[in-house]
Amino acid sequence: MRLTALAAIAACVLAAGCGGEDQAAQAPEPASTALTIELDPGEGASTTTWELRCSPSGGDVPDPAAACSGLAGETDPFRAPPADAVCTEIYGGPARLHVTGTLAAEPVDATFTRADGCQIDRFDSISTLFGLPPAG
């Protein structure tokens, strides 16, 4: 009887171990992030384009791993300022940053300008996150 009980326990342990490996192999891939970042400095200058991929990190932004880490730490990095935000009336130049693609498998299509104080802050925050050269 003892031998039968030990055999049954061994069979259960082996079955559980094998089942766990199958489940790990079938785990879903992490949500994908693939972004295209276009910087148009304005005033007839050439547009520069960078790519960023996360999980695993890659692309041609200056530091893809840092950019992916920074994006992961943000709640909504592409949100626009609230409609009722009070912004300084200061013009930061004609530069325009356009980000398209997916962030954690969600579509992204965001434009950043330097049209006023709120927009300058937003532009600078996202360009710093991507490690891009300053504009303006």
Image (spheres, grey):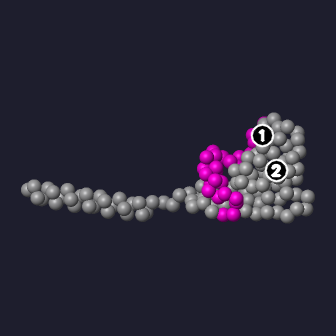
SS majority, magenta: loop
Q: Which residue is mark 2?
A: 113
47 versus 120 height, above or below:
below
Do we see residue 122 in this rendering? Answer: yes
Residue, x 61% and y 51% (percent of image)? 69
The residue sitting at the right extreme is 43
What type is the residue that disc 1 sits on?
Answer: Ala
Q: Is-magenta flag for residue 73? A: yes
| In this rendering, position of residue 129 left or right of residue 97 | left
Q: What whole-number distance in Å separates the C-alpha atoms at marks 2 and 1?
A: 16 Å
Residue 20 point in image, percent of width and height: 35, 59
| In this rendering, position of residue 34 left or right of residue 120 | left
Residue 119 point in image, percent of width and height: 80, 45
Q: Which residue is mark 1?
A: 83
Q: Are marks 2 and 1 in contact (CB under 8 Å)?
A: no
User: Count of labels shown?
Assistant: 2
Mark 2 vs mark 1: give the one in front: 2
Do we see residue 101 in this rendering? Answer: no
What type is the residue that disc 2 sits on?
Answer: Thr
| In this rendering, position of residue 114 left or right of residue 110 | right
Residue 13 point in image, percent of width and height: 25, 57
Helix, strand or loop status at disc 2: strand
Residue 107 point in image, percent of width and height: 66, 57
Residue, x 33% and y 61% (percent of image)? 19
Q: Which residues are magenta?
A: 59-84
Question: Which dot marks residue 111?
Answer: none
Assess disc 2: are there few (<14), some (14-19) or many (≥20) residues with their C-alpha within 10 Å of its C-alpha. many
Q: Is-magenta flag for residue 80? A: yes
Residue, x 84% and y 54% (percent of image)? 95
